[in-house]
Image (tube, rainbow, N blue to C red):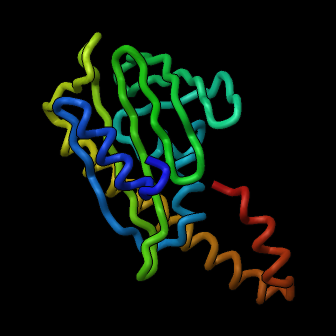
């Protein structure tokens, strides 16, 4: 599957999981900005995923990740999987999370999300509410990106007014949520 894009790869993975749905959208932001939000498991991820209260990364070895997730309802999941630029696939006994992003040739970034509550012992997710949850997550992701763009624009304008260089200001903003 190395010759195909990450979004197509996510569709292929989701096709192997009974009941899985995929939400896909082109967001008007560069890949680097989009993945900075999507790939930030301990920070931004919980802000755009409707059911997630938080994720704590336990171990990282290359692109392999082990993490603990807690839902807004108190449920916990011990996730294992892979995270690399543009790709995330994590699963536990009761949860599957899949995210993909890639540059769109006409501009922006194509994003795809899948996941849900897993049927234990099977390659299946409970199909109820999955599509609406993914749609809400996509909308919240877009909102997080719009907020970050406004913050960066405001900082650049402020920097010009204060006589600071844009390059120095951009460097300081890179690590901000």
Front residue of 52 and 123: 123
Disc tally is 0
Image vertical order of residue 170 relative to residue 49, above or below: below
Compared to 113, does 126 lie above or below? Answer: above
Q: Residue furthest top?
A: 121
- The outermost residue toward the left is 128
Q: Residue at x 68, y 29 (%)?
A: 60
Which of the 4 quarters of the picture holds residue 168?
bottom right
Is 75 on the left or on the right of 150, as rendered?
A: left
- Where residue 134 sits, quadrant-wise, is top left
Question: Which residue is found at the position 85% from the left and 84% from the top?
Answer: 165
What residue sits 38% from the left and 48% below the top? 9
Quadrant of res 120: top left
Q: Position of residue 29 (x, y in %)?
A: 49, 72
The residue positioned 69% from the left and 57% from the top of the image is 176
Q: Quadrant of the C terminus?
A: bottom right
Location of residue 11 in the rendering, given as x and y in whole percent from the top left corner: 30, 48
Q: Determine whether 160 is above or below 43 in the image.
A: below
Q: Where in the figure is residue 95, as x and y percent of width and height?
A: 36, 23
């Amino acid at each position: 599957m190395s010759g195909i894009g990450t979004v197509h790869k996510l569709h292929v993975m989701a096709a192997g999981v009974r009941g899985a749905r995929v939400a896909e959208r082109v967001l008007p932001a560069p890949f680097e900005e989009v993945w900075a939000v999507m790939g930030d498991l301990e920070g931004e991820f919980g802000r755009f995923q409707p059911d997630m209260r938080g994720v704590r990364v336990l171990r990282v070895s290359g692109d392999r990740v082990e993490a603990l997730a807690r839902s807004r309802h108190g449920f916990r999941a011990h996730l294992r999987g892979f995270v690399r630029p543009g790709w995330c696939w994590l699963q536990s006994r009761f949860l599957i999370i899949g995210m993909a992003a890639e540059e769109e040739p006409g501009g922006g970034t194509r994003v795809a999300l899948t996941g849900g509550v897993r049927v234990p012992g099977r390659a299946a997710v409970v199909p109820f509410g999955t599509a609406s949850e993914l749609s809400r997550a996509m909308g919240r992701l877009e909102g997080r990106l719009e907020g970050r763009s406004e913050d960066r624009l405001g900082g650049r304008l402020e920097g010009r007014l204060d006589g600071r260089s844009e390059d120095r200001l951009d460097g300081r903003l890179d690590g901000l949520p």
